[in-house]
Amino acid sequence: MTHSADTTWRSMTPDDLTGVMTLTACIHPDYMEDWAVFEERLKLAPDGCFSLVRDKEVLGYLISHPWQGLISPPLNTLLHTLPDKADSWYIHDLALSPAVRGQGFAQQALLLAEDAARRHNLHILLLTSTCHAISFWQKAGFTDAPTHKAEQAVLASYDAQARLLQRPID
């Protein structure tokens, strides 16, 4: 767990999903995903899902899991299973309430993702960035990953400027 006064990152539980959905509706209205997507990610990779909470209120979340290859999951798509031979740790979503931004919680979430990746012996973080978040991810050390035609179609499911980004884990 990571703490800052009364606001804490902890392992996500199914009870957090209502707060996660409320937060995603406020933060990502143009990139909405069904409850089932978040529920499935939590079931498939509980060690990669975290909630930032204060007094039981979800103020942020991190959804991440093992992944293979450079074709990212399309927006609002169920995975059904995780890859048998993952080669990266995929950050599906990191969201913070405006009330807690700028306080270091995003950096703490990235450390949680790195720790999860290391436990799986994976050394690359991978993510799909929407046009709104590219500069944030670049400041966090992420760079463009190679994209092929199939990945370009997936990126277009997010927005015209979406990019596949990666960062090695030290």
Image: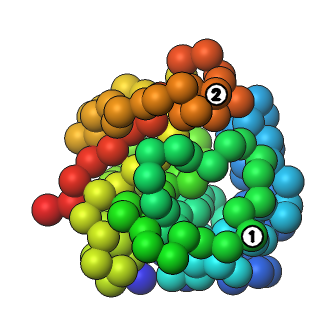
Residue drawn at x 30%, y 70% is: 122
Mark number displayed over residue 31: none
CB-based contact (under 8 Å), mark 1 and mark 2: no
Q: Nearer the viewer, residue 157 or 141?
A: 157
Mark number displayed over residue 153: 2
Residue 73 x, y percent position in the rendering = 63, 49
Q: Find the distance from the CA under tag 1 to the CA under tag 2.
A: 21 Å
Q: Which quadrant of the structure image shows residue 107?
A: bottom left
Q: Earlier in the sequence, mark 1 or mark 2?
A: 1
Residue 31 x, y percent position in the rendering = 73, 36
Residue drawn at x 22%, y 53% is: 168
Query: Under tag 2, what secondary structure?
Result: helix
Q: Which quadrant of the structure image shows residue 165?
A: top left
Query: Under tag 1, what secondary structure?
Result: loop
Placement of 91 over or under 1, stated as above or below = above
Residue 16 x, y percent position in the rendering = 74, 74
Side (left or right) of 163 relative to 4: right
Q: Nearer the viewer, residue 109 or 93?
A: 93
Residue drawn at x 76%, y 81% is: 14
Q: Which quadrant of the structure image shows residue 89?
A: bottom left
Q: Give the position of the C terminus as an image quadrant.
A: bottom left
Identified by mark 1, the residue type is: His
Side (left or right) of 12 relative to 138: right
User: How many marks are shown on the rendered structure?
Assistant: 2
Residue assigned mark 1: 80
Placement of 114 over or under 164, stated as above or below = below
Q: Residues within 10 Å of mark 1 (few under 14, many from 20)?
A: few
Identified by mark 2, the residue type is: Ala
Q: Give the position of the N terminus as an image quadrant.
A: bottom left
Placement of 46 over or under 108, stated as above or below = below
Would you say residue 155 is visible in this rendering? no
